[in-house]
Image: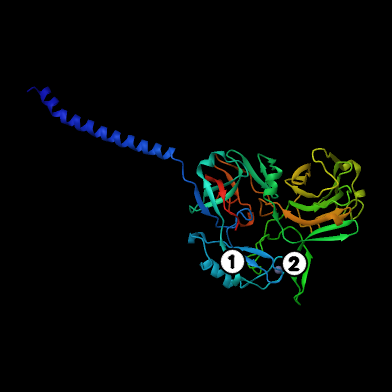
């Protein structure tokens, strides 16, 4: 046997073994690849989970107690934050629920001010059920509601306001993207409007005042209502004030009411709305088929004439300050009722009739931080035809009057905010920052 033969013969089993090992390794890698591909191709299951915080209220409700006032029969609810460390949602006997009821045996009714509504009769609802689809992630758009996992791995539900690569800042409660005020469609605006509670309608001849009121009891137990500002008030009723949070300042608000037709007379009225430094007049006239929008500056709440906002008349609005819209698309007739919605939101005044937008004027007050106004709306004209007024507010994206620093959203990340911004920890906070989404909201239960 030559040395070469000997080597050759000795190498053969070794080569075979190596070949075998290589084949096995290849097989393992191939199998893993197939498995991996299989996992990629199988759609991820839709994730169902329960909303556990107040951060998206009133759009999505977390655990809450429902109560009924024995005095006025109004129903209201009180939200409850569940400790994330406990994991599972609470029930009536959960430590949170028991602790809550022990701390506050009575709740105050937001409608009549009766402050002895017993919490022992409360019905507990452990939060809304929602479904999130991980595959719907790719088609996420601004204002969509999406899901991500927070630092503790818990699923959180928030609204997407900034997309990858954008510069995002919050100024006086409005959203600025790449340096410009971001405006929404009327549907987007209206879908997140929240009621601010009880309103009162007062008629004085041709003038009707619609006011947001705070109802309470005097020391003798008699009901009383106090006109109150829209700002800095919690939209969520508190348990004896125990969880009354300092709430964001309400910069943008809405008025909604019904205009009732009568005797074939034309629909004709004006609405006065107040901003910190301007008053707005919106006039509808079905006979002339026009909508007039005018504004006039206010100095310490008074017009140039010296008249207070509540005493303003048409004469306080100069002709040159008017913008006229023609009423063509919306067949405004004298013989039918109309639902009127007037909003001052996202730096614009928007008028809608029966949910259709018919006038939009820039208000140019982005840098004008709103202050609370006790009398925000006055109706001019035959106000006896106006019913069911409601004052609503925008869902704000700021908990303070100050401006947030501009944030550049990294690739693959999104800037998210909770609708109930005072109770939300979101991209405004350094420890949350911009997030990687894990799914888009695809389905929801009925609200509790
Ligand atoms: Zn009540």
Is residue 400 depicted above or below 169 in this figure? below
Q: Cβ(mark 2) to ligand 1 < 8 Å?
A: yes
Does the residue at mark 1 contact the one at mark 2 (Cβ under 8 Å)? no
The total number of labels drawn is 2
Q: Quadrant of residue 81?
A: bottom right
Color theme of the render:
rainbow
> What is the number of the mark on residue 215?
2
**Dot 1 lies on which element?**
strand
Q: Nearer the viewer, residue 362 or 324?
A: 324
Instruction: Determine which residue is flagged by label 1.
Output: 123
**Dot 2 lies on which element?**
strand
Residue visible at 88% across and 53% down? 380
Q: Is residue 193 visible?
A: yes
Q: Nearer the viewer, residue 274 or 264?
A: 264
Q: Quadrant of residue 234?
A: bottom right
Left or right: 269 in relation to 442: right
The disc, 1 or 2, on the residue closer to the chain's N-terminal end is: 1
Percent position (x, y) of residue 370? 75, 53
Q: Nearer the viewer, residue 416 or 188?
A: 188
> What is the number of the mark on residue 323?
none
Q: Is residue 412 visible?
A: no
Percent position (x, y) of residue 38? 40, 38
Residue with the most extreme left position: 1
Q: CA distance from mark 1 to mark 2?
A: 24 Å
Percent position (x, y) of residue 362? 78, 42
- Packing grade of label 2 (10 A; few <14, some 14-19, many >=20) is many
Q: In the picture, which quadrant includes the N terminus?
A: top left
Percent position (x, y) of residue 192? 67, 50
Q: In the picture, which quadrant includes the C terminus?
A: bottom right
Left or right: 375 in relation to 36: right
- Packing grade of label 1 (10 A; few <14, some 14-19, many >=20) is some
Left or right: 356 in relation to 315: left
């Amino acid at each position: 046997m030559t040395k070469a033969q000997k080597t050759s013969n000795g190498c053969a089993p070794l080569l075979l073994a190596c070949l075998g090992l290589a084949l096995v390794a290849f097989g393992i890698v191939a199998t893993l690849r197939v498995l991996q591909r299989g996992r990629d191709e199988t759609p991820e299951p839709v994730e169902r989970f329960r909303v556990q915080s107040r951060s998206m209220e009133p759009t999505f409700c977390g655990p809450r107690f429902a109560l009924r006032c024995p005095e006025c029969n109004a129903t209201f609810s009180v939200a409850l934050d569940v400790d994330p460390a406990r994991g599972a949602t609470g029930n009536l006997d959960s430590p949170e629920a028991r602790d809550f009821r022990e701390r506050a045996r009575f709740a105050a009714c937001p409608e009549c001010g009766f402050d002895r509504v017993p919490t022992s009769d409360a019905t507990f609802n452990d939060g809304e059920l929602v479904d999130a689809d991980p595959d719907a992630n790719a088609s996420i758009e601004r204002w969509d509601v999406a899901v991500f996992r927070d630092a503790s791995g818990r699923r959180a539900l928030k609204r997407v306001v900034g997309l990858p690569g954008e510069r995002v800042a919050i100024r006086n409660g409005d959203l600025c993207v790449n340096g410009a005020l971001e405006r929404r469609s009327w549907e987007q605006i209206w879908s997140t409007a929240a009621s601010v509670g009880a309103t009162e309608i007062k008629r004085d001849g041709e003038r009707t005042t619609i006011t947001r009121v705070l109802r309470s009891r005097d020391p003798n137990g008699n009901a009383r209502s106090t006109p109150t500002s829209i700002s800095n008030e919690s939209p969520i009723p508190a348990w004896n004030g125990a969880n009354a949070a300092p709430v964001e300042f309400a910069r943008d608000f809405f008025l909604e009411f019904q205009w009732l037709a009568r005797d074939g007379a034309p629909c004709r009225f004006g609405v006065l709305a107040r901003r910190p430094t301007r008053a707005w007049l919106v006039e509808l006239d079905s006979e002339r088929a026009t909508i007039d929008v005018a504004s006039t500056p206010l100095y310490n709440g008074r017009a140039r004439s010296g008249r207070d906002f509540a005493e303003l008349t048409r004469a306080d609005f100069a002709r040159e300050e008017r913008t006229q819209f023609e009423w063509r698309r919306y067949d405004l007739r004298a013989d039918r009722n109309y639902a009127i919605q007037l909003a001052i939101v996202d730096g614009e005044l928007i008028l809608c009739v029966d949910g259709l937008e018919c006038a939009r004027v820039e208000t140019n007050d982005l840098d004008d931080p709103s202050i609370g106004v006790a009398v925000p709306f006055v109706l001019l004209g035959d106000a006896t035809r106006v019913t069911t007024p409601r004052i609503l507010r925008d869902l704000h994206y700021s908990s303070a009057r100050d401006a947030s620093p501009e944030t550049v959203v990294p690739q693959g990340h999104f800037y998210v905010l909770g609708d109930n911004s005072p109770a939300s920890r979101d991209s405004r906070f350094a420890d949350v920052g911009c997030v990687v989404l894990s799914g888009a909201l695809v389905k929801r239960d009925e609200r509790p």
